[in-house]
Structures are given as structure tokens and as C-alpha cells.
Image (cartoon, rainbow, N blue to C red):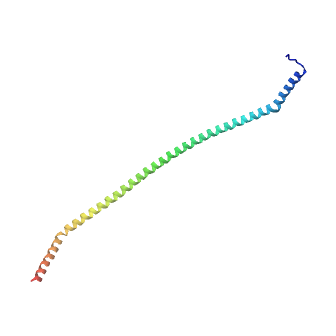
Amino acid sequence: MFLSIDGTLLVQVVNFVVFIILLNIVFLRPVGAAIAKRRAYIESVAHDIEAADNELRSARATADDRRLAARRAAEATLAKARAAAQNEGAAILAEFSDRAAAKAQAARERVDEEVVQARARGPELVGALAETMLQSAIGSGASAR
């Protein structure tokens, strides 16, 4: 079993080399290029997804910050409005308390004045009452006899 190197082996080697070259030109290079393009596309899509995800996180953070700032501003505005309303309410209450006190004082003064007038008319009224009682007593006594 000796291996003899003759012309067929040389033809087969040349045939194999030509086949590899043709296989490389016709199949392996285009497939490799397609795989490289596909990998580049996948990497670009992955990069775009990552960039969009980062942008989304940033937008959410910005929205959360704005929402928090708006909530704080609204709470501050509400607090100011409540304070202003309380101050206004206190002022209105003080005004009406002053009015009520003034009306009560005026009523006391009028009552005091009426008491003074009634006391001044006291002897006159006592005399009129005494006369009315006397006439009633005399009138009923005269009609009873």
C-alpha cells in the first residue's frame, strides 16, 4: 500500500484549491458580509434602544422633578391663600366684633338713658298710679254702696 503520487493527485489538489477559492468567492464572502451587516444592524438597534431607554429615564426623571416642583409650588400657593384667608377672616371677625361691641354699648347707653328717664318720671308715675288706684277704690266703693 504505497501511495503513489501521480497526476490525478495533483489534479485533485488543484481542483480542491479552485473549489475553496470559488466557495470563498461565491458563498463565504457574501455570507460573511451579510452576517457582518446583520451584526452591525443589530448593534445599531441595540444602541438605539439603549439611547431611547436612557432618554426615557431622563424624561421620566425630568417629569418627576417638574411634578414635584409643581406640587411644592401648589402647596406653597395654597398655604399663602390659606394664610391670607385666615388673616381676612380674622379682620372680618374683628370688624364685626367691634360693630357688635359698639351696638351693645349703644344699647346699654340707651337702656341707661331710659332708666334715667324712668327714674325722673318716677314721682309723676307714682302720683298717677296712686290717683288711678284711689279712683278705682272710690269708684268701686261708690258703686258698691
What x and y, as percent, mark residue 54?
A: 61, 38
Q: Closest to the observer: 85 or 70?
A: 70
Question: Residue visible at 59% across and 40% down?
Answer: 57
Q: Quadrant of the C terminus?
A: bottom left
Q: Closest to the observer: 123 or 74?
A: 74
What x and y, as percent, mark residue 122?
A: 18, 69
User: In the figure, residue 14 lies in which quadrant?
Assistant: top right
Question: Residue visible at 14% across and 75% down?
Answer: 133
Q: Residue furthest left?
A: 145
Residue 140 against residue 65 in the figure, above or below: below
Q: Seen in the image, is 24 located left or right of residue 40? A: right
Q: Residue furthest right?
A: 7
Residue 133 against residue 62 in the figure, above or below: below
Q: Closest to the observer: 98 or 84?
A: 84
Residue 64 against residue 2 in the figure, above or below: below
Q: How many numbered marks does the figure carry? A: 0
Q: Residue furthest top?
A: 2
What x and y, as percent, mark residue 48?
A: 67, 38
Question: Residue visible at 84% across and 30% down?
Answer: 22
Q: Quadrant of the N terminus?
A: top right
Question: Residue visible at 74% across and 35% down?
Answer: 37
What x and y, as percent, mark residue 137?
A: 12, 78
User: In the figure, residue 20 lies in which quadrant?
Assistant: top right
Q: Closest to the observer: 118 or 22?
A: 22
